[in-house]
Image (spheres, rainbow, N blue to C red):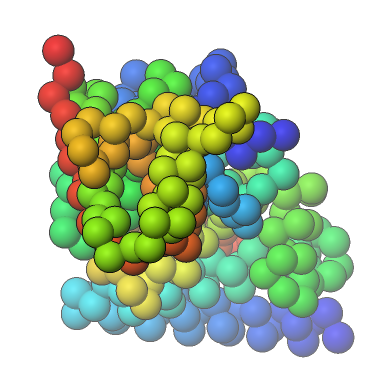
Amino acid sequence: MNNEKKEILIKTAKEYFNSGEEEFAKQRYNSALVLYFKALIALTDLHLLQKTKQTPSSHTSRFKICQEKFPEIYNLIDKDFPFYQDSYSHLMSKELVEVIRDDAKIMAKKTETRL
Amino acid sequence: MTQKLWLKKLKLDYNSDVRDIVQFGSSIFEDSDPTDLDVGIIFNKIPIKNQLEESQKIKNQLQKQTKLKIDIKSYDFYSLLHKSNFAREGILFYGKSIISGKEFARQFGLMPKIRIKYDLSDLKKKDKVRFNYALSGKQKNYGLLRKYKGRLISPKIIEINPEHERIFLKKLRSITEKLEVEKIFIQQD
């Protein structure tokens, strides 16, 4: 069961990240940000699965688990989450999107995932 | 724990690129019952990555001061003033500096004030009396002006602090709708 979850998380992380790259190349920064953030979250869940054998069922529980057990990751996703929330109503800058992309890469490295 | 972080004289740890830490949004207002606290962090022009990392450190310190969720936004002066920043007025006009404990606008030598002009000419005498009691009090009860340090600056015009806007308007509008509200900055000496 966990292997299946792991495969799904890796597949979705790659798909979101690479779609993010395509949107970024087209200078569609809001779309890119959403996709990079989704990749970041898929990789966060993968990390939780690797370390705790469980995956969270909601953003709330994800944040809670990370805050308690993985503060470094909590700071990463907590820092980026407001931009994901604002992405429907605010224009996102290239520089900001690059930050979220880098954070997704950090989590890819932590989880030993090739994006 | 108070929601007015700017009154707490907090000893925060932040780097020299932080120009100010400003509480804004609904939690500023006197009669508010906010579900979260909005805080804007104003930086010198530095990379966004560095802004966000520093903001997160400050957020973690502020979060220890309140049970309410802290919602952080990071700005440099350009992004703060940009038209796409929907929080611009909330920070510039209503914002309170958590560093200085004073109005954020004072950074620019400006003091934000609300002026309310009222017209009681169409009111019945009893409502005119009610209005004046609301502002100036009756016997031992303080009126809004004394309670919230507002002042009558000329006949039919009062001047109050921005954080008291809602409480004044709520009370005064229960008596008359003939109110004009002006937001102004007064140059400080």
Total count of labels? 0
Q: x, y (%) of residue A69?
A: 79, 48
Q: Nearest the camera: A1 or B109?
A: B109
Q: Nearer the viewer, residue A16 or B2?
A: B2
Q: Is residue A108 left or right of residue B179?
A: right
Residue farthest along the front direction in this orientation: B125
Quadrant in the rendering for residue A35: bottom left
The answer to whether residue B118 of the structure is visible from this angle is yes
Considering only vertical position in the picture, is B139 above or below B78?
Answer: above
Which residue is drawn at the image coordinates 48% and 42% (left, top)? B133
Describe residue B137's horizontal placement relative to residue A8 as left or right: left
Q: Residue furthest top?
A: B189
Residue B53 or A82: which is nearer the viewer?
Answer: A82
Please state, as top left, top right, bottom left or bottom right, where the N terminus of chain B lies in the image.
top right
Q: Is residue B28 visible?
A: no
Image quadrant assignment for residue B59: top right
Quadrant where the C terminus of chain B lies? top left
The image position of residue B121, as x and y in percent, is 24, 59
Q: Is residue B8 left or right of residue B181?
A: right
Q: Residue at x 37, y 31 (%)?
A: B150
In the rendered image, residue B60, in percent from the top left (x then y), is placed at 61, 37
Q: Position of residue B7 (x, y in %)?
A: 54, 24
**What residue lies at 26% left-to-right and 24% top-to-bottom?**
B106
Residue at image point 16% right, 29% down: B186
**Position of B118 relative to B103 (above/below):** below
